[in-house]
Amino acid sequence: MDNFVWESTVFTMIAFLALLWLLSKYAFGPLMGIMEQRKKLVQEQMSTAEESRKQAGEHLEAQKKALEQARKEAYEIIESAKVTSSKQADDIMNAAKAEANRLKDEAVKDIDSEKNKAIAALRSQVGGMSVMIASKIIEKQIDEKSQEQLVDQYLKEVGNK
Amino acid sequence: MHIFPVIEIAGFHIDLSTWISVIVSCLIVFIVARVAVSNLSVHNPSKMQNFMEWVIEFVHDTVASTMPLSKAKHFINLGITLIMFIFISNLLGLPFGVVTEHHEPLEIAGSMVVTEADITKYDGHAHIAWWKSPTADLSVTAGLAIIVIFLVHFLGVTKNTKHYLKHYFEPFPIFFPLNIMKEISKPLTLSLRLYANIFAGEVLISTILMLGWVGIPLMAVWQGFSIFVGGIQAFLFTILTMVYISQATVHDEDH
């Protein structure tokens, strides 16, 4: 071991420690800083992803609810439209029926009154004519009044039959 | 064998080849590390950055995967610096050597590098090796081991005092001398293992060189194997350091 030089040992130690200091200051320090930063970044991104996943779930839930709501409303609208339309149809039918009844009644009334008028006219004419016939046949002086009484009596008998 | 150029300045012996290679090794490590982290990005890391991050993760897992990155930072710095410095140091001596041949005594900066005795010892032509792996020098690996062992004991005393003092007397007080031997053998094995592997590799390289052109295929094989050995030794040194550190810092109550 004649080539062991303790000065070399000391020099190596100094050089190595200097290298260690330089490397940790200018090479590995920054590199480890970057690694720490990346670790932080990954954690941050993971939590952000979790957050957005949660938010997406919430949104989906909200949309489902909204869709359900809309469907319900549409169903209600259709139902109410159905009810209204059937009611309207009923109304129209009722109105038409009432109108028809009214028209029929009026027609019946008209017919009645016309009939009565015609009867009355006929009665008076028949009265006059029978007077004339009677005066011609009987040629007697039965006054018109008793004559009329007679005819009425006859007519009543006829009408009752 | 080669002579190493040791000069004497103010009473200190300075092994030029060791100093040069340590400085070059440090420079290369620093430049590589700087290039690797030149374009740092959180979102879009470059290939080099990915590689460096993988190294950090690897060392982190080794020293204390339960420690958060901010706490284990210093140990990781130490681990990466160790593995890079040792690996590059191991490779430095492989690609080429700078050897000068001298037939006369050589004097540099007032100190005799090649003496008359050396020349007669090596049959008239002494070789000076100016270039080698710094880790092929026991004084360099000893320096690294001293740093590591000092750190380990320092951490044990400050962070884990009770357990540190107790472990010398476990499992029974009679084991105290054995535990002391274990602690002493730690730096010895650390430094000697690294030194011996790399030095043996370089010795074999210079031996193969003596074969001339016949040794070319052998040289190629051995160079490749030396790269492998260099990687393994760097890895081993770092792993052992990290294991020692985690032993010293991790507080295990149930023992």
Image (tube, rainbow, N blue to C red):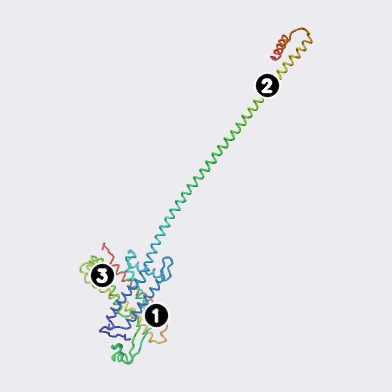
Residue B10: where, in percent of width, then height?
Answer: 26, 84
Q: Kindly report which numbered mark, 1 or 2, lies closer to the viewer in this rendering.
A: 2
Camera-nearest residue between B179 and B161: B161
Chain of the residue that carries numbered disc 1 in the rendered image: B
Q: Count residues near mark 2 (Cα–Cα under 10 Å), then give few for <14, some for 14-19, many for 20+.
A: few
Amino acid, disc 3: Phe
Residue B66: where, in percent of width, then height?
Answer: 33, 63
Image quadrant where residue A115 sits: top right
Horizontally, residue A107 falls left or right of residue B213, namely right
Residue B12: where, in percent of width, then height?
Answer: 26, 83
Image quadrant where residue B211 sits: bottom left
Residue B184 visible here: yes
Circles 1 and 2 on the same chain: no
Residue under label 3, please give it. Answer: B154
Residue under label 1, please give it. Answer: B223
Horizontally, residue B219 falls left or right of residue B145, namely right
Circles 3 and 1 on the same chain: yes
What distance separates the C-alpha of mark 3 from that of mark 1?
39 Å
Mark 1: which secondary structure?
Answer: helix
Amino acid, disc 2: Ser
Chain of the residue that carries numbered disc 3 in the rendered image: B
The answer to whether the residue labelled 3 contacts the one labelled 2, judged by CB atoms less than 8 Å apart, is: no
Q: Which mark is residue A113?
A: 2
Q: Is residue A57 above or below residue A134?
A: below
